[in-house]
Amino acid sequence: MAGLPSLLFVPLAALTVFTLNRTGFGRLLHAVGDNERATRLSGVRYWQVISALYIISSVLAGITGLLYIGRRTSRFLP
């Protein structure tokens, strides 16, 4: 039986692929990741892109931590 982490992974992975390949934010992420200096010199506020990426990453890490805690402590409950 598929657990909750498996059920959350598929839509999140699809959303990530869609965002990286089909949106302007995804293009900015590729540009910053490819050459940060060139992106900065072209007028993109790269620090906003990096900040948004850190925020998204921390939210996903928090969700992962909650799911991990739920799975680790569930066997101790009656």
Image (spheres, rainbow, N blue to C red):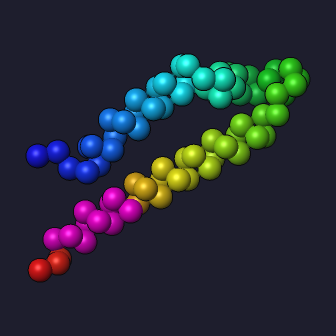
Is residue 30 shown to the viewer in this render? Answer: no
Residue at the image point whose x is 33% and y is 44% from the top: 8
Specify start and end residues of the magenta stretch as a single range.
Answer: 66-75
Quadrant position of the C terminus in the picture: bottom left
Residue at the image point whose x is 17% and y is 78% from the top: 77
- Give the vertical position of 54 relative to 75 (above or below): above
Q: Give the quarter of the image for residue 46.
A: top right
Residue nearest the viewer, comparing 37 with 27: 27
The answer to if 70 sits in the magenta stretch is yes
- Residue 28 position, x and y percent, is 69, 26
The answer to if 3 sits in the magenta stretch is no
- Give the vertical position of 50 relative to 21 (above or below): below
- Give the vertical position of 36 relative to 11 (above or below): above
Residue at the image point whose x is 32% and y is 35% from the top: 10
* 26 with respect to 9 (left or right): right
Count of numbered labels shown in the rendering: 0
* 29 with respect to 8 (left or right): right
Residue most toward the bottom?
Answer: 78
Residue at the image point whose x is 55% and y is 47% from the top: 57
* 74 with respect to 65 (left or right): left
- Residue 3 position, x and y percent, is 20, 50
Magenta-colored segment: predominant secondary structure: helix
Q: Give the quarter of the image for residue 40.
A: top right
Residue nearest the viewer, comparing 34 with 49: 49
Is residue 6 shown to the viewer in this render? Answer: yes
